[in-house]
Image (cartoon, helix red, strand yellow):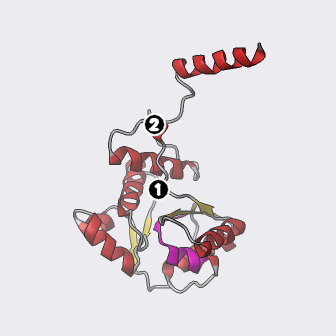
Amino acid sequence: MTGATGAIYGVRMLEMLRTLGEWETHLVVSQAALLNIREELPGGKARLEALADVVHNVRNVGASIASGSFICHGMIIVPCSMRTLGAVAHGLSDNLISRAADVMLKERRRLVMITRETPLNLAHLRNMTACTEMGAVIFPPVPAFYSRPASLDDVVDHTCMRVLDLFGIHVESEKRWRGLSKDAAGLVDAAAEMEAD
């Protein structure tokens, strides 16, 4: 987790993985993320760390996850600040988060970056392009309104579900897209008939 707003995404991701029960999670929190966690999360850092199996210090670039020999399915940077995005894009490896991300890229493992910023400037866009070209997935947490979210929790859950799908981890949800409603499908059929005439 890095210093962008949206700490709830990190919490919910850890909660979902813990509920599934078969995944070991490693948590790294940047210094800037601690400020957001204080502002955004009831229970703060203690609540967050209790959800992870292993917690690493962001300055410990000698941690297990800093090596390609550490076996894992991938890494999610959630939320991902523009500073961390830039560090990954330029291969800086200046803390454990950017080093572990660099390992994901060099080992051709899945790296998903839940980028949080708007509007985007040219540096942000170029860094997103660089990370994408290296194999990362840029995943801004854009709400899916077709799921008709009734709360902020619904919006967060849908994003986390979609991110976990990228790792082949499928969380059951009634909010998945099931196709157009009968009414909407009828409108499409009627429009197609009008075009055919």
| Percent position of residue 183, x then y | 52, 18
Q: Is residue 65 left or right of residue 48?
A: right
- How many marks the image carries: the answer is 2
Please say if the residues under marks 2 and 1 sit with CB atoms less than 8 Å apart: no
| Percent position of residue 81, x then y | 48, 72
Q: Kindly indicate the quadrant of the structure image that contains residue 122.
A: bottom right
Residue furthest out toward the left? 43
Does the magenta-highlighted stretch encompass residue 86? yes
In the picture shown, does residue 91 fall above or below 189?
A: below
Mark identifier at residue 23? 1
Secondary structure beneath label 1: loop
| Percent position of residue 148, x then y | 41, 36
Q: Which residues are magenta?
A: 75-88
User: Which three-letter amino acid code belongs to the residue tagged 1?
Assistant: Trp
Residue visible at 38% across and 66% down in the picture: 5
Look at the image and tell me in which quarter the C terminus lies: top right
Q: Is residue 66 visible?
A: no
